[in-house]
Amino acid sequence: MTQQTSPPASRLQRILAYIVAALVILSLVCIAAILIGTAAGQFAQQGSGEGLWPTVFVLPLVALPIAFVLIIVLLVVSARRNRAANRAAGAGNSANGANGPKGRR
């Protein structure tokens, strides 16, 4: 059985992965800040719409769904790239006269 090596990640895949990682990490930092601020008693005072707390509170509510959508986009891009690579490898084998799996194509 032959081993297939996956093609290296494209620039789009790397950018999407870094954006997803940054959004998730930023959201987790904001959630930790909310927990620490609440434990320290600062969130109740600043949570009324003053200072940095409204941004810290809203950022995870926006960033996590965006990261989820970008993960789905990354999966679709990766699947399309792998499908194209498999088709190219299949076309190369059939051009050389190699017998592939029989069945519906």
Image: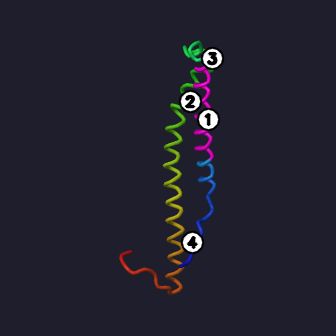
- In the rendered view of the protein, which quadrant contains the C terminus? bottom left
Q: Reading the chain from its start, which is encountered first: label 1 or label 4?
A: 4
Q: Secondary structure at mark 1?
A: helix
* Distance (Cα) linking label 2 and label 3: 14 Å
Residue at left 58%, top 39%?
Answer: 24
Q: Reading the chain from its start, which is encountered first: label 3 or label 1?
A: 1
Looking at numbered disc 4 in the image, what kind of residue is underneath it? Gln
* Distance (Cα) linking label 1 and label 2: 8 Å
Count of residue discs:
4
Badge 2: residue crowd in 10 Å (few <14, some 14–19, many ≥20) = some
* Distance (Cα) linking label 4 and label 3: 54 Å
Residue 31, image x, y percentages: 57, 30
Residue 59 badge: 2
Quarter of the image for residue 45 reads: top right
Residue highlighted by disc 1: 26
Quarter of the image for residue 5 reads: bottom right
Looking at numbered disc 1 in the image, what kind of residue is underneath it? Leu
Q: Secondary structure at mark 4?
A: loop
Residue 43, image x, y percentages: 58, 17
As drawn, 25 above or below 72: above
Q: Secondary structure at mark 3?
A: loop
Residue 51 badge: 3
Looking at numbered disc 3 in the image, what kind of residue is underneath it? Gly
Residue 17 on the magenta segment: no
Residue 62, image x, y percentages: 52, 32
Badge 3: residue crowd in 10 Å (few <14, some 14–19, many ≥20) = few
Residue 4 badge: 4
Looking at numbered disc 2 in the image, what kind of residue is underneath it? Leu
Outermost residue to the front:
39
Read off the magenta span: 18-41
* Distance (Cα) linking label 4 and label 2: 41 Å
